[in-house]
């Protein structure tokens, strides 16, 4: 007796953030970078700012 096996492929993942969200996050980071005086934090902010830019 044969049984049909069904293969269930996972549904396509939906984007968590929109392009507008990335633009807003980048604007917030830029604003925060202007008032940050700690070099280590500014370096982390700059790196994140540029990583977010690669998604838009």
Image (tube, rainbow, N blue to C red):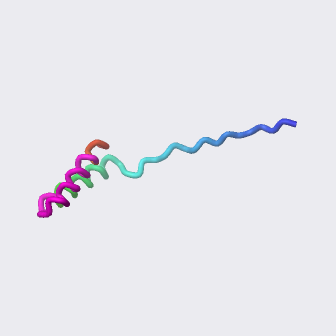
Question: Percent from the top left, x then y, of residue 55?
Answer: 31, 43
Q: Is residue 23 left or right of residue 1?
A: left
Residue visible at 27% across and 47% down in the picture: 51
The answer to if 44 sits in the magenta stretch is yes
Residue visible at 51% across and 43% down in the picture: 12
Residue furthest toward the front?
40
| Residue 25 image-quadrant placement | bottom left
Residue furthest toward the right?
1
Q: Quadrant of the N terminus?
A: top right
Is 1 or 19 nearer to us in this picture?
1
Q: Is residue 32 above or below residue 10?
A: below
The answer to if 40 sits in the magenta stretch is yes
Residue visible at 26% across and 52% down in the picture: 48
Residue interval drawn in magenta: 33-51
Q: Is residue 1 left or right of residue 7?
A: right
Residue visible at 42% across and 48% down in the picture: 15
Is 23 or 43 nearer to us in this picture?
43
Question: Percent from the top left, x then y, of residue 43?
Answer: 19, 54
Q: Quadrant of the C terminus?
A: top left
């Amino acid at each position: 007796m044969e049984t049909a096996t069904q293969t269930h492929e996972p549904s396509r993942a939906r984007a968590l953030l929109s392009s507008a969200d990335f633009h807003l996050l980048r604007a917030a980071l830029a604003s925060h970078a202007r008032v940050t005086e700690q070099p280590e934090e500014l370096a982390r902010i700059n790196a994140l700012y540029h990583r977010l830019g690669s998604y838009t």
